[in-house]
Amino acid sequence: MDSRKELVHSFVDWNLVRCRLDRYDSISKYYPIEVLQACAETSPFYCHYLGWRLGTWPGSKGDELLSFFDRQLEGASHLSGWDAEFRSFQRDCEFGVFWSLLWQMQVANYFSKFTEVKWNSKGPDIVVTTENGAFFVECYCPQRSYGMQTYISAVFDRIGSDIRVENALWLPFSLPQNCKRSSFLDELFSPYLTPKFLSEKRREALDVWPVLLPVPRGATGLDLFIEGPSDSYQPLVVDSTAGSPKAYFVDILGKAIHAKAKENDLQNHRPNLLAINFLLSAGYQMDSGRFDKLEVIHECSPPDVVDALMLSASGIDKELERNDFNVTHASKDHPIMSLLDG
């Protein structure tokens, strides 16, 4: 068996998975255990995005988050067109699919409280029909390196609670993509297959920490280190340099807008709304409120095919509410405006 695959498998409690499948009706309906187990053999993550969470999320907090996902799943499945929409998500082995799917469900369930919503078989994700007309919603939860970083953090959390995975705020951050991911992850986790390696690093942390841990070539802006006793902390070990919050905000927002503007035939589905959730970006969450949204969006130069933007950093533990997002870049006669005013 592949060494890293064996490491990941050792952390997933399949008895806990089965117990939780018995507890959550919608999850068990749409995620039978054979679907969850199939991804356990698939590189680079060797786990299903929901199977990992069912089998590793601890205690009452884990149950709280899974209960919320179950409720969102139930609500989304009652909307017209669900089966066709969900088919592409169910057997996907990408770790980040969890956030993409949950964000789509949060948006669809939010609008369904006020008006008619259905899943769209072709083009943008959902169609929202109001008294002032219908509009199409394309949902996007940017991940790339942040999604992979979260997977890395999740595995290291199981290896040891004293291991930290961080990246500098508002600075370039990237991890290998596509076919390079598997070899990067193999090299990253390889030292921890030998107990001696981690025990030696922990002994070092008793005297001075953070103790830096090796990061393979191909990563930019990723820091790994071990914590030790509070009286041994040396703050200058890890570079605390930060970049420009506004430049970072413009960069990630611009990339997100332009990436989705080219997908799902947005130009032929008008009016539309591009709903972007930056929950994986700590930099966005900390500083997006400092800047004038219209000024930042102007700098991003949204393509003409984008009729309105919905920006959020909504998490994975509660229903979407009006104060969780901002709508901007919309004309006054865009149908979304009637829902906001109401």
Image: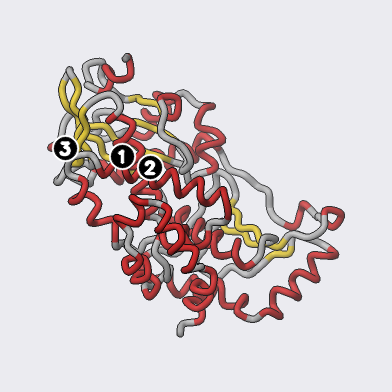
In the structure shown, which secondary structural element does the residue marked by tag 2 occupy? helix
Q: Is residue 261 left or right of residue 66?
A: left
Q: Quadrant of the N terminus?
A: bottom left
Distance Cα–Cα, label 2 vs label 3 = 33 Å
In the structure shown, which secondary structural element does the residue marked by tag 3 occupy? helix
Which residue is at a point 70% across and 73% down the rendered structure image? Answer: 198
Which residue is at a point 68% across and 49% down the rendered structure image? Answer: 240
Going by the numbered disc 1, the residue's amino acid type is: Gly
Mark 2: few, some, or many residues within 10 Å (few <14, many ≥20)?
some
Disc nearer the start of the sequence (1/3)? 1
Distance Cα–Cα, label 1 vs label 3 = 29 Å
Residue at label 3?
A: 267
Q: Nearer the viewer, mark 1 or mark 3?
A: 1
Residue at label 2?
A: 71
Residue at label 1?
A: 75
Going by the numbered disc 2, the residue's amino acid type is: Arg
Indicate the quadrant where residue 251 lies: top left
